[in-house]
Amino acid sequence: MQGTVVTFYSYKGGVGRSFALANIAVLLARWGHRVLCVDWDLEAPGLHQYFRPMMPVRPTGGVVDLVDDFLAGRSDPIDHAIRLSTAGTLGFVAAGRDDPDYVRQVQQIDWELLYEQGFGDYLERCRDQWTADYDYVLLDSRTGVSDVGGICTAQLPDRLVVLFTANMQSIRGAVDIAKRANEARDALPYDRAQLTVLPVLSRFDTREEYDRSEEWRRRCAGATEVLFRNWLHRSVETEVISRHMTLPYVSYWSFGEQLPVRSESNPSADQIGFALETVAAVVAHHFDRTDLLAENRDAYVAAARGVNREFPHELKVSTPRSTLDFAHALIAELGTFDIDAVLSMSGDRSLLERDDDARHLCLIVDRKLSRWQSAEVELFLHRTLGQDRRVIPVLTADAEPNALPGYLGNLRYLRTGPWRGPAEVAQGLAAQLNGATTLGEVNLTGALLQATRADLRPSMWGLVDEVVHALGTALEAGDDATAQELAGDLLVAIRPRSADDEGRTSAPRHVREAIKRAAGALEAREQASTTREGFR
């Protein structure tokens, strides 16, 4: 799969463009993506200052050397990237060598003449090589309107992150450059889709003058609304997403070139790392699923963080003390199926916040779900949206499936009993983990019934409507795998997010009709299956 090129641009200097790019690059690499950063701010390079502590060697070449390579007649681009010493894969192409000859190299470049000689095609080959080797290529573009800026905003990127501050010249410059970039792309001899643009309000100070800051928030959201139109989910208001796409001013990080994401490993909402994570998650989600971001920012970031994550254990077995011996025996039996399982049993909620060390979760439920387990599964699902992670309940003889919370009641469960001990349950768990769909195998009838009884915010009913229509289509087409995935999505969509019922409504008429259609398709499939069995 080809990687994605994302340019970071600002019309004016001093907005923290390189700061944002460097921190977001570290986050994406930490989350398991292969990332390359390229410093295209040739006249004022500075990206290397953020990465200097991670550089094993000084750069011996860079972007300006691509010009020399081209003029020397090299057909295949030379790899000028150096590998930085940080978590994950993070490469860096500097603007050039850090020596007196660099200034001469930059001053001698005639971009117009280079393009007449075919340098644009050479850059395309560089781009192809970068996107083959990396998942994300982040370009640090120079400010203003220039030839280099045109390369970074029009020819090379798939997406554009525009940083601006709360003043009209910065805002208008951001909107204007996006318009210019798309016009320039239309004239390119290369196949380019319309540019998607993410406006990021940077260095925004809300600590004083609250009324003025709120007024400028509204101004910024209104002025940049046009940039959101071709990618923001239709149910999400611009002002809502604009708040998420705001990097606060924090004086501590204004001194020197620093990377707060390296020290703020689990940032709170008042730390700049929190906002940087949110922007990084939008990039990782390819500007998609913004309805989830508006509904639950933490789940959105968790989904981005866990896409390529490696877990120390395959399965966590959560148990109350009453079934502790059974849990130990079950873990031992799971080892015979090469499933690495770990025990979870504690009453300390703070452990849950820090502990997410297994891909899947098995809940041993004795009579009813304990408070600890309820918190554990809530947090697990909170971190799970968009990922292939499963919850599998194991019920004792005294546990009633109908008494389970709605988000568990529709999952396929396993039973313990006189003839179903640890060995048999381990076999059932292994079968689910080897072939189950996300969040377990869903009871389709139960999922549709639960949807009819849900109370949701109006914005969420639009999502439910889309999922139910797609589910009905999959059932009519006999696509069981897609139907299972969509039913899992439906359960996630209708899961209560908070105890606040204000503004929630029951299913609108058109949604109830869509659910009825899907239920009819499911009933028809079940009847057809019964008929086939009768003829055998």
Image (cartoon, grey):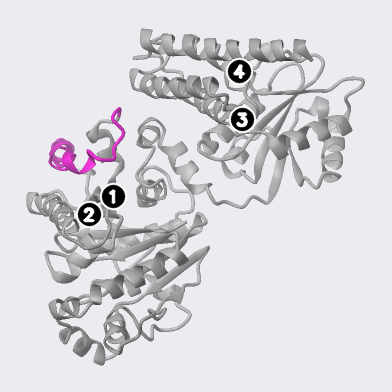
- From the image, tell me which residue sits under label 4: 405
Element under label 4? loop
Query: Label 4 is placed on what type of residue?
Result: Pro
Q: Picture coordinates of residue 258 (x, y %)? A: 36, 65
Tag in front: 1 or 2: 2
Whether residue 110 can be seen here = yes
Q: Residues within 10 Å of mark 3 (few under 14, many from 20)?
A: many
User: Where is the C terminus found, in terms of image quarters?
Assistant: top right
Q: Nearer the viewer, residue 217 or 65?
A: 65
Which is more N-terminal, label 2 or label 1?
2
Which is more N-terminal, label 1 or label 3?
1
Q: CA distance from mark 4 to mark 1?
A: 38 Å
Query: Label 3 is placed on what type of residue?
Result: Val
263 sits left or right of 534 in the view: left
Which is more N-terminal, label 1 or label 4?
1
Q: Picture coordinates of residue 89 (x, y %)? A: 50, 65
Residue 225's quadrant in the figure? top left
| Magenta-colored segment: predominant secondary structure | helix
Q: Residues within 10 Å of mark 1 (few under 14, many from 20)?
A: many
Residue at image coords 11%, 54%: 173
Tag in front: 4 or 1: 4
Which is more N-terminal, label 2 or label 4?
2
| Residue range (magenta) | 209-235
Q: CA distance from mark 4 to mark 3?
A: 10 Å
248 sits left or right of 416 in the view: left
Q: Residues within 10 Å of mark 4 (few under 14, many from 20)?
A: few
The answer to whether residue 232 is magenta is yes
Q: CA distance from mark 2 to mark 3?
A: 38 Å
